[in-house]
Amino acid sequence: MSDRRILLATISSSVAGILLSAFIHSNLTVTNFYSDIGSFFTRTWVASGQVPYSSSAAFLEYPPVSGVLLYASRLIGGSVSGAFGGIYAGYYWTFSALSLVAAAVLGWSTWRLANALGTKLNPVYFLLPSMVIYGIYNFDLFNALFIVLSLQLFVEKRRDTSAVLLGVALATKFVAGVMLPIFLIELEGGRERVRYLVLSLVAAGVFFVPIALFNFGYFHQFLSFYSGWGLEDAWYIWIFGDPFSHAAKAFGLVLLALLLFRVYTLKMPLVQKCFLALSAYLLSTYIYAPQFNVMLVPLVAVLAITSPSLYLMEVFNALLILTWFTTLDPTHAWTVPQLMALLRSAFLGLLCISIASSTGHSLTDWMKARLGGRSPSGVPVPATSVAD
């Protein structure tokens, strides 16, 4: 397949996945699958078109770029509501239209990233269940877009623009922050690192400063909201049982620190390391909502992963929302949704081990090395077999 045909196939697949997602979450279907975008509209301040973050009553639990997208959808949707049969329809299809544009740019940027890396891109991955079911669901598609744009520009050595886009990603969802140390490590020289860090923080600050000036209390409200939120789809609910366990949240933080330290000290290609860092966050955070997987889709496409763990992870991730409303307490252990979450995390973990092994970092060899240079059977392991 020619390079141009791969580009067209990638953009087409990405847009097709989001079109299908827009349809299944719309009121055009009998099932009308749940989405956060639909849920947001039940909030009085969203339905009435108030500016998010403008007061305690207009609280949004997501960073400001997400708020901009929500407000733009309501503002534009209200002006075109006559053509769609109501304000909600105008709001929903405006958000869907913005998502289609984001999907097209995401496909283009993923293709550019693959070209810069010299890898063979597989466009079919943009039709994975996470993309279709959770594409029009929350703000994760836009988060994925800014993450990939930042990666693409970094690989193309357009570092200043990469830093700005990473800052925008941070102001969309904070998870992109785990990639910042990777970029800083990759850069050469203290001046380059300081410049990249400052540009990223300034780009993010552009969105946060207006909130600080007009409603500083929002930040306390934000922290209170998340400190009071319990475990959601975190695999270790099966260990602690109580979704509101403080020990469970502490466990997650310690696990995140350990996993990220290990990832940051590995010597491997940039995209693989970013995938592992994002996955480390997902495997340790106490809120691992299923839509978070959308940000992994373009990286999976670039890496053209063929491990069976990928497909099993995707199946169980899709089943999370499909089983969520089958029980009154879906965040508790011993429920079907949390069984799906446990299996999803297990296969994500196996996928990470597979990716690490493909770059020369075998988990079994690493463990053997930590056992004094001997395998469990007592046979010495040559030093060259361990790639750290």
Image (tube, helix red, strand yellow):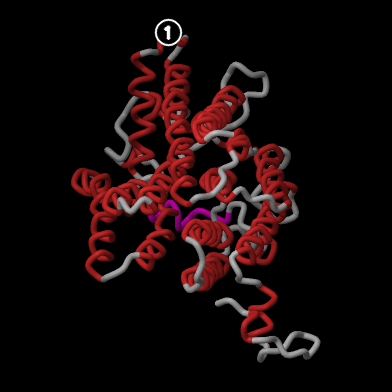
Against 171, residue 242 (above or below) is: below
Q: Is residue 296 visible?
A: no
Total numbered circles:
1
> Is residue 224 magenta-colored?
yes
| Residue bounds of the magenta highlight | 223-231
Q: Is residue 209 visible?
A: yes
- Residue at 62% x, 52% y is 233
Is 36 on the left or on the right of 124, as rendered?
Answer: left
> Is residue 327 magenta-colored?
no
Residue, far left? 213
Indicate the position of residue 178 as horizontal and vertical percent values: 43, 60
Amino acid residing under circle 1: Ala
Q: Nearer the viewer, residue 242 or 316?
A: 316
Name the residue beneath numbered marker 1: 83
Q: Quadrant of residue 358?
A: bottom right
- Residue at 66% x, 80% y is 367
Q: Quadrant of residue 133?
A: top right
Indicate the position of residue 161 as horizontal and vertical percent values: 28, 48
- Residue at 70% x, 41% y is 319
Indicate the position of residue 264 as horizontal and vertical percent values: 47, 69
- Residue at 62% x, 29% y is 33
Residue, far front? 2
Q: Nearer the viewer, residue 3 or 246?
A: 3
Indicate the position of residue 311 as horizontal and vertical percent values: 70, 46
Q: Quadrant of residue 82?
A: top left
**In what quadrant of the picture does the C terminus appear?**
bottom right
Against 40, residue 313 (above or below) is: below
**In what quadrant of the picture does the N terminus appear?**
top right
Is 315 on the left or on the right of 284, as rendered?
Answer: right
* Local SS, label 1: helix
